[in-house]
Image (tube, coloured by chain):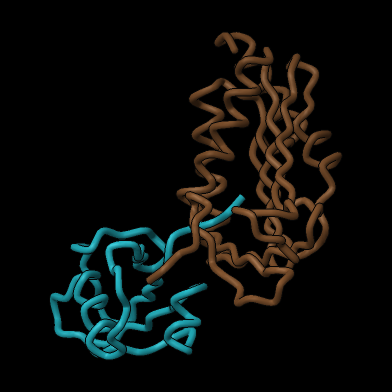
Chain colours: A cyan, B brown
Amino acid sequence: MQVIVHYHALLREKLGRATEAFDMKEGSVAGDILGEIQRRHGALGNVSLLQVAVNEQIAGKTAAVKDGDRIDVMPPFGGG
Amino acid sequence: MDKISASKSSSLNAALNISRVSVLLTRELLDPTLPTAEVQDPTTGAVATFIGTTRSLHEGRKILSLEYEAQEPMAHKALKDICNDALQKFSLCKARVHHRLGKVDVSQISVIVAVSSLHRAAAFDGCRYIIDTLKTTVPIFKKEHYADGSPAQWIGPDGKPVTL
């Protein structure tokens, strides 16, 4: 299955791209995608700071993902 | 707000088709008179408006401007959820949040929170709840640009540079 990952703010700048497709195994969870990002790009540092949203809902690292899902990976927020 | 007053206020709003919660994310300059006027209601006795502006110094460094970006659909929904939460928690009548995106120069307004309630304590508390919660739970990201030309930095909810 394939998911499209959207990077934001510092993460987008660090990786040099706004979106990226990942082929994942069936049964993968949100945390697996973070692992794939690490494997592909390395040097992500503190992954625990990142928040993941599945189809624009904030999700835990164990949230299931399915083919065609939109995944947003976001660094710490700074509004206000 | 007591139950009868809340019910009257709610009926009036419904009759006038005035939304109790509204959120704006915009690249245009913010005007605090608009959300402040929008939350006013004949059934309420208090309006509190918080205005966040871009200051010229942060942690001893001279700021040129801020730059905000957001996951906009998520930020919009999260802000509405916070406002609706505040309506319940503090018995507010109405709540508005207007937040800038893009480049915000020193002294310009970056965020406005306006709420109305029956009495002032709830208005102050509700307004503070919304701005405090916004900072940690809404996917809006802030970058500081410095006057000395040093590299811009993304800033987290604690006011410290984000490092990954």
Q: Nearer the viewer, residue A15 or A64?
A: A15
A23 vs B149, left or right, is left
The quarter of the image holding the C terminus of chain B is bottom left
B116 vs A46, left or right, is right
The quarter of the image holding the N terminus of chain B is top right
Percent across and percent down for residue B48 are 72, 27
* B85 relative to A80, above or below: above
Percent across and percent down for residue B58 are 64, 54
Q: Residue at x 66, y 35 (%)?
A: B95
* B35 relative to B139, above or below: above
B112 vs A25, left or right, is right
Q: Nearer the viewer, residue B150 or B138?
A: B150
Percent across and percent down for residue B67 are 67, 67
Percent across and percent down for residue A67 are 27, 81
Q: Within the image, what quadrant is residue A28 found in?
A: bottom left
Q: Residue at x 14, y 81 (%)?
A: A26
A59 vs B122, left or right, is left
Q: Within the image, what quadrant is residue B61 found in?
A: bottom right
* A17 relative to B28, above or below: below
* A6 relative to B115, above or below: below
Q: How many marks?
A: 0
Q: Residue at x 67, y 20 (%)?
A: B117
Q: Residue at x 73, y 65 (%)?
A: B65
